[in-house]
């Protein structure tokens, strides 16, 4: 009887673990962003391949969301590289609706700032930081910072203007906190998934301060725990408790 109970418990917990650890969703960088300066129209990564973003992966595991952004050359640079800084991650719970010509109505203050949330980094690479904390804030469109040259001569430097890259969090309280870190190939942002986001398609937007490359995309709605999953977990835990009681009586 104990063998059957153990097998049932193990199966229940195994199925639960598989449902909790879904395969990450990959978003390839197919978004061009707004028109850049000089002769870089219809170009994904402008100025230099060092700014090229290749993809983003979104993982929902155990109630936590992790977004990994891959730019194999850029994240390995000593920041601020060419006076550029790491951007914040902008999020919409309504997916995204790209505008014509590679631009997006969600990306600029001029057309309403449709990003509802932002995972704001506590440091943007001002001193080559490799990790830190994030705060998740509800977005006030007037506090979105758009890509620019930060005082550099536009005749000598190229950039893509009008792209959301950072957010002014002054005087605001974060809804929750998380962490960020980067290595030589990616930037990883992680925080607990708000329960209000389940059931909604999520849109994402990230770029560095110059906007030389920007990635946008969306994922299906985050998974909602299914009744059978909760039932399996309950039966598994009940099985373990019953087995522990029987062993206790036997040893007594």
Image (tube, rainbow, N blue to C red):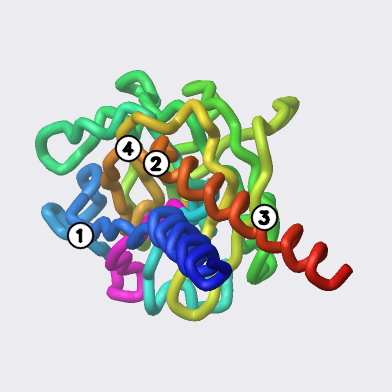
Foreground tag (2 vs 3): 3
Q: Looking at the rendering, which quadrant does residue 201 occupy?
A: top left
In the rendered image, which quarter contains the C terminus? bottom right
For residue 141, the mark is none
Query: Which numbered disc, 2 or 4, marks the residue that appears first in the sequence?
Result: 4
Query: Which numbered disc, 3 or 4, marks the residue that appears first in the sequence?
Result: 4
Foreground tag (2 vs 4): 2
Q: Residues within 10 Å of mark 3 (few under 14, many from 20)?
A: some
Query: Which numbered disc, 2 or 1, marks the residue that appears first in the sequence?
Result: 1
Residue drawn at point x = 53 percent, y = 63 percent? 5
Q: Is residue 148 left or right of residue 201?
A: right
Region rendered in magenta: 47-60
For residue 44, the mark is 1
Q: Residue 175, percent across and down?
A: 65, 31
Along the line of sight, the residue nearer the viewer: 166 or 219: 219
Residue drawn at point x = 69 percent, y = 55 percent? 241
Q: CA distance from mark 1 to mark 4?
A: 27 Å
| SS for callout 4 | loop
Foreground tag (1 vs 4): 4
Q: CA distance from mark 2 to mark 1?
A: 45 Å
Foreground tag (2 vs 1): 2
Task: Report which residue position mark 2 lands on.
Answer: 228
Task: Report which residue position mark 3 lands on.
Answer: 242
């Amino acid at each position: 009887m104990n063998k059957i109970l153990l097998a049932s418990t193990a199966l229940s917990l195994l199925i639960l673990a598989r449902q909790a650890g879904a395969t990450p969703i990959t978003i390839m960088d197919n978004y061009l962003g707004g028109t850049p300066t000089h002769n870089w129209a219809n170009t994904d990564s402008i100025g230099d391949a060092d700014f090229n973003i290749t993809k983003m992966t979104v993982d929902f595991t155990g109630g936590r969301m992790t977004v990994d952004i891959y730019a194999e050359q850029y994240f390995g640079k000593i920041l601020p590289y060419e006076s550029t800084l790491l951007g914040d991650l902008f999020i919409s719970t309504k997916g995204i609706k790209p505008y014509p010509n590679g631009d997006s109505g969600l990306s600029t203050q001029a057309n309403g700032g449709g990003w509802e949330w932002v995972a704001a980094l506590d440091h943007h690479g001002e001193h080559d930081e490799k990790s830190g904390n994030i705060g998740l804030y509800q977005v006030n469109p007037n506090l979105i910072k758009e890509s620019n040259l930060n005082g550099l001569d536009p005749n000598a430097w190229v950039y893509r203007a009008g792209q959301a890259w950072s957010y002014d969090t002054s005087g605001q309280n974060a809804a929750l906190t998380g962490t960020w870190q980067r290595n030589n190939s990616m930037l990883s942002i992680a925080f607990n998934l708000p329960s209000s986001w389940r059931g909604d398609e999520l849109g994402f937007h990230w770029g560095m301060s110059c906007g030389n490359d920007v990635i946008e995309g969306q994922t299906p709605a985050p998974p909602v725990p299914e009744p059978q999953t909760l039932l399996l977990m309950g039966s598994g835990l009940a099985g373990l408790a019953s087995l522990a009681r029987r062993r206790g009586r036997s040893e007594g």
